[in-house]
């Protein structure tokens, strides 16, 4: 009997799973609340005007057009009936399953201060990216026309909260914009005088990297005009700016890159979750009490070799590959593979133009060579020749001409009532 496999989420984990189930004796239903697969590692480049949305996102239906075994649904999941073996959609419809795979990812977390989101958007979706891009560009435009010096100073202050790879990569390109791309285009302001802040409550930036690479990144950002503040938490965020410790800092553009929270999958399933809301799974990434329900990617708390698996794209893809092997083995009545093990390929982060850091364990790179390796790696993981060429050409143009190609203010504001 052909089994019904339902996959919730078309991110890295879900899409890899569906790809690896090609030819298996099953009918697959792929559900996502958006119609596109998103290459999240380059989302910050959409937010900072370097890439267009179409260069890092692809319609799911187009990706699945040749897979007659896959039915794609644009829908929002609101619950799971474990006893009845059905996924419950917001529309009220129910999708039956024999095997369920949840790969719904994560959103930014504000540590109990969700009211900060409208003034400090995070960066997980295309909507987030276009909101941030709009605010960045409007800040310069409004600074050009205001005659209030205090307001101009606030408009030209950009604060990024959280100094992991996303935060560091954001401030690197914002600095490039202010220092090299925009100065000749404005007449009443000097964009090079912008105050660009990277704020980290912990003792250093890029804490997942070795100390030496972290120090290099901080020094490199400083040379590009970024003010790095560590060891002091943000205690308030509003439309006027932030409070750093007990120091108010007027800033009209604030970006949140400080934490993530898993999707509500644990609530749907009624199971144990970790502090970030991720579902605790077993050796084969399934629920300990229900081996037909798998949870993978950023939605899952996965342990490999005694350590938590990081929420990065390579880990998500490896989990998708593993679960596909487990499902194939069950469908063919073969022994299941060994327990999941994550094979880390290292950490990468770009700091700005011509600068990046890479930690491959024994091999550590920094500077221009690391920047080229970082770029090649990201182009390799993009889907399709057209996307690889488009991103490569955008980067080449930006590198040679110091011009970013995606600087249109088009979308409406998605969080605030104004603009």
Image (spheres, rainbow, N blue to C red):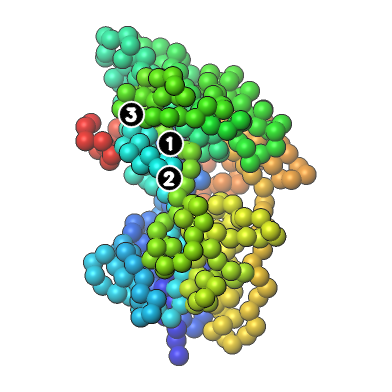
| Residue highlighted by disc 1 | 256
| Residue highlighted by disc 3 | 238
- Categorize mark 3 by other alpha carbons within 10 Å: few (<14), some (14-19), many (20+): some
Q: Is mark 1 on a helix, strand or loop?
A: strand
Frontmost of labels 1 and 3 is 3
Q: Nearer the viewer, residue 378 or 283?
A: 283
Image quarter hosting the C terminus: top left
Image quarter hosting the N terminus: bottom left
Q: Is mark 2 on a helix, strand or loop?
A: strand
Q: Residue at x 74, y 45 (%)?
A: 361
Q: Where is residue 180 in the image (x, y as percent from the top left)?
A: 48, 20
> Mark 1 or mark 2, which has the lower sequence index?
2
Report, in whole angstroms, how far the alpha carbon at label 3 lies from the one at label 2.
17 Å
| Residue highlighted by disc 2 | 108
Frontmost of labels 3 and 2 is 3
Give the quarter of the image for residue 301: bottom right
> Mark 1 or mark 3, which has the lower sequence index?
3
Q: Is mark 3 on a helix, strand or loop?
A: strand
Q: Is residue 207 left or right of residue 277?
A: right
Report, in whole angstroms, how far the alpha carbon at label 1 lies from the one at label 2.
8 Å
Q: Residue at x 26, y 14 (%)?
A: 145
> Mark 3 or mark 2, which has the lower sequence index?
2
For the view shown, which residue lies furthest in the bottom direction? 1
Q: Above or below — where is 66 with respect to 395?
A: below
Q: Position of residue 275 (x, y in %)?
A: 50, 52
Q: Is residue 364 visible?
A: yes
Q: Which residue is drawn at 49% across and 64% down?
A: 272
Q: Is residue 390 visible?
A: no
Q: In this view, does 374 lie to the left or right of 115?
A: right
Q: Which of 166 and 145 is in front in this view?
A: 166
Q: Where is residue 374 in the image (x, y as percent from the top left)?
A: 61, 41
């Amino acid at each position: 009997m052909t089994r019904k496999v339902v996959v919730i989420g078309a991110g890295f984990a879900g899409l890899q799973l569906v790809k690896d189930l090609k030819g298996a004796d099953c009918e697959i239903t792929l559900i996502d609340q958006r119609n596109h697969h998103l290459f999240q590692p380059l989302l910050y480049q959409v937010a900072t005007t370097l890439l267009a949305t179409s260069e890092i996102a692809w319609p799911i239906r187009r990706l699945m057009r040749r897979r007659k075994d896959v039915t794609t649904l644009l829908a929002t999941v609101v619950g799971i009936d474990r006893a009845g073996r059905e996924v419950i959609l917001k529309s009220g419809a129910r999708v039956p399953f024999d095997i369920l795979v949840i790969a719904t990812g994560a959103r930014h977390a504000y540590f109990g201060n969700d009211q900060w989101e409208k003034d400090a958007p995070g960066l997980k979706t295309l909507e987030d990216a276009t909101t941030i891009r709009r605010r960045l560009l409007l800040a310069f435009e409004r600074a050009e026309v205001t005659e209030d010096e205090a307001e101009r100073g606030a408009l030209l202050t950009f604060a990024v909260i959280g100094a992991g790879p996303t935060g560091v990569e954001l401030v690197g390109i914002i600095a490039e914009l202010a220092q090299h791309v925009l100065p000749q285009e404005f007449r009443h302001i000097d964009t090079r005088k912008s105050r660009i802040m990277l704020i980290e409550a912990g003792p250093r930036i890029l804490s997942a990297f070795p100390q030496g690479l972290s120090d290099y990144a901080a020094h490199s950002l400083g040379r590009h005009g970024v003010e790095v503040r560590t060891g002091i938490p943000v205690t308030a965020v509003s439309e006027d700016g932030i409070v750093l410790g007990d120091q108010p800092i007027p800033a009209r553009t604030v970006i949140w890159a400080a934490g993530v929270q898993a999707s509500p999958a644990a609530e749907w399933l009624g199971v144990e979750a970790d502090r970030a809301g991720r579902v605790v799974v077993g050796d084969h990434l399934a629920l300990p009490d229900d081996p037909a329900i798998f949870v993978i990617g950023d939605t899952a708390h996965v342990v490999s070799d005694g350590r938590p698996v990081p929420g990065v794209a390579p880990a998500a893809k490896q989990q998708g590959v593993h679960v596909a092997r487990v499902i194939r083995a069950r469908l063919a009545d073969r022994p299941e593979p060994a327990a999941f093990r994550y094979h880390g390929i290292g950490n990468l982060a770009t700091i700005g133009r011509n600068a990046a850091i890479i930690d491959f364990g024994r091999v550590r790179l920094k500077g221009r060579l690391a920047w080229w390796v970082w770029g090649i790696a990201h182009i390799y993981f993009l889907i399709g020749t057209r996307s690889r060429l488009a991103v490569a050409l955008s980067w080449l143009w930006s590198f040679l001409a110091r011009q970013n190609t995606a600087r249109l203010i088009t979308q409406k504001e998605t969080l605030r009532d104004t603009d």
